[in-house]
Amino acid sequence: MTEEQSAQRTLANRTIIMSGGSRGIGLAIALRAARDGANVALLAKTDQPDPRLEGTIHTAAAEIEEAGGHALPIVGDVRDDASVADAMARTVERFGGIDIVVNNASAIDLSPTSSLSMKKYDLMQDINCRGSFLLAKTALPHLEQSDAAHVLTMSPPLNLNPKWAGGHLGYTIAKYGMSLVTLGLAEELREAGIAANSLWPRTLIATAAVQNLLGGDTAIQASRSPEIVADAAYVILTRDPRECTGNFFIDDEVLREAGMTDLSVYGGTDDQLQKDIFLD
């Protein structure tokens, strides 16, 4: 496919089902797609306002509509088989099919093994790894009907440098499980023309998780805005799925490859920005 043909691909009338998306990176991805006129179904738990978190699934849906898209907020749980099946059925009933799965929902706890509770370990496994597998698996019959089918998972490269597992083993297992979903689906679905890729930020991203769990205002100042991940996701999701699969993308590399050289619009300076984990 030529660069001109790639530039003509958009997300207009494409249907995305996303886990999470009430705020942060997921919402930014949804809003970027909405500017093309995409349909976005959000499967998330935040039905009522939480003083610790900005936004709900309903405020996110309103923003998507205002940006030019069509939103379907679905209160549910990506850990639950019936909830995911119901979300899929409601999305297909509303929009007629599914083109894109975005595995965005994720739980984080960077505690070392000695202090990580098994309840939190199970939560990370169930949301991050099992949830990503389940959402993609349940969508497969619909993705097979699309000529622009993508599964995009917010997970890191499979970096086996021991310092990552040695620093926070439980979280590393859960995030690498998501990345294995990408690795396996890309190979399994290659002949079907369904792309599977992962996307990870080079730096910390200014989200509620970073604010609340990774260092407060100091961490936010060392972060880029969620729009950098959203713009990189848009580049990936508008590529031909038969030519773009099995990749572990880094956000700024995607944008530079697409011709963007000035990343200052996303905030921070090189001496301020803090590199994300799993990147040596």
Image (cartoon, grey):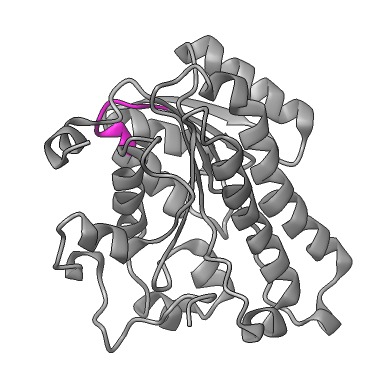
Q: Point out residue 109 in the picture as x, y percentages from the top left corner.
A: 69, 70
Q: Position of residue 55 (x, y in %)?
A: 48, 47
Q: Position of residue 111 (x, y in %)?
A: 73, 79
Taking the image as shown, residue 230 lies to the left or right of residue 56, namely left
Specify the quadrant of the image occupied by residue 3: top left
Q: Is residue 177 left or right of residue 143?
A: right
Q: Residue at x 55, y 10 (%)?
A: 93
Q: Is residue 61 visible?
A: yes
Q: Splitting the image into 4 quarters, where does residue 20 fall? A: top right
Question: Looking at the picture, how far across and down is residue 139, in whole percent?
Answer: 60, 27
Residue at image coords 36%, 33%: 64
| Above or below for 177 versus 17 | below
Which residue occupies 52% across, 65% down?
A: 157
Find residue 165 and report its image quarter.
bottom right
Relative placement, left or right, of 122 versus 73 is right
Above/below status of 39 relative to 204: above
| Residue at position x 47%, y 11% in the image | 96
* In the image, residue 229 above or below residue 34: below
Between 207 and 248, the one lying in front of the other is 248
* Magenta-highlighted residues: 33-39
Residue 105 seen anywhere in this rendered image of the structure: no
In magenta stretch: residue 108: no
